[in-house]
Amino acid sequence: MQNKKPKVAIVHDWLVAYAGADRVVDCMHHVFPDAVIYTLVYDKKKMPAWFRDYDIRTTYIQKLPFATKIYRSLLPWMPAAFEALDLSEYDLVLSSSSSCSKGVITRPDAVHICYCHTPTRYVWDFYYTYRDNANWLVRRVMPHQMHKLRVWDKCAADRVDYFIANSHYIANRIKKYYRRDADVIYPCVHINEQPLCPKEDFYLVVGRFTWYKRIDLAVAACTKLGKRLVVIGGGGEANHLHALAGPTVEFLGGGLSDEEVRGYYLRAKAFLFPGEEDFGITPVEAQSAGTPVLAFGRGGVCETVLDGKTGLFFEEQTVDSLAECIERFEKDGVSFSPEEIREHSRGFSEERFENELRDYCARRWKDWADELYACSRRDELAAKSNGGETK
């Protein structure tokens, strides 16, 4: 086994939109091109065309009506669905998890490495916030389900052999809730290689219109200051955001191509990031366009933005705090040039991620194989010393 090339499976929570975690899975597949990808549900129409060339296998949840639309509401059934996946043929299982995919069952002699985007947020520290922002039915059901899900989630984490966290912020949360150490490999971000161009007089926000992104703060702050804001994205909070917006706020929807979005990144004077996220890919995408980031100073963004150099932080998640940060930026700017800001972003590139992940998995596989070999040798020696039988 020491010299054996492992048979690899990749397990991901769900594939229903090509967002940050899905891009990580794509890069994982670049590292292990022969790997099968297992996932809860898969929406071919919402994923890039090249995913159709991958061997993607789903759980039985896929067969339910509207499964790719209602999958989040099926959280109580996710653990059983992932545990039902038969991964017994694989030597190395690489899970990409912010929910239940880490709970798959592997062979005793297989190694399971979990790339953890976050311990399940709505089960642990963000439970109360998620509950308070949910509809009346979810608020009624959640308290009765969460205790069982917390017990299962901790048991699922215990099945993982090695944890990789996507930031030191998440490594600390893994330590807190799972009592496990984690190595850190920052996720992959596409580096914008288009030529840098003069900045225009507008701020930019890119993201799904969901409450925890706090896009409402950006809309309200720019409305208050009379600053032009371009908002790219869509989602359930659209009506609320439109109601907050003044005449200086422009909504472009979520149908733009990647190239169009990168063009806005290049031209924006600064990118606004008012949410608290585990890593935050969009701030790095902005920096790769040479654009400074004005961000709420908590979460993974503290590891990707250099305060005063590639961006500025504001301390409170309020309209006034963000507005003050915008005024400070307009007065003092940041010390790095657009070229220096882009160069800083290269530390989070796709190539860097793939190389680090490849080296990490090879090292862990060798450690695991060496340990199994040492155990088998000890058993053989014990058997010989006991007349050919192990105790």
Image: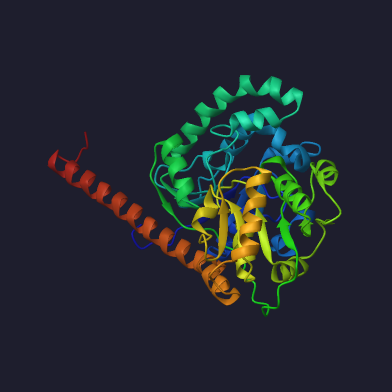
Q: Residue furthest bottom?
A: 195
Closer-to-camera residue (3/364): 364
Q: In this view, does 260 lie to the left or right of 324?
A: right
- Horizontal and vertical percent for residue 331? 63, 64
Where residue 258 sits, quadrant-wise, is bottom right
Name the residue rendered at 65%, 63% in the picture: 330
Where residue 44 sits, quadrant-wise, is bottom right
Decide: is 1 above or below 11: below
Closer-to-camera residue (174/262): 262
Q: In this view, does 253 lie to the left or right of 210?
A: right
Name the residue rendered at 58%, 37% in the picture: 121
Decide: is 383 above or below 8: above
- Horizontal and vertical percent for residue 247? 86, 54
The C terminus lies in quadrant? top left
Decide: is 274 above or below 203: above
- Horizontal and vertical percent for residue 335? 53, 70
Name the residue rendered at 77%, 54% in the picture: 233
Closer-to-camera residue (97/104): 97
Give the total number of marks visible in the rendering. Answer: 0
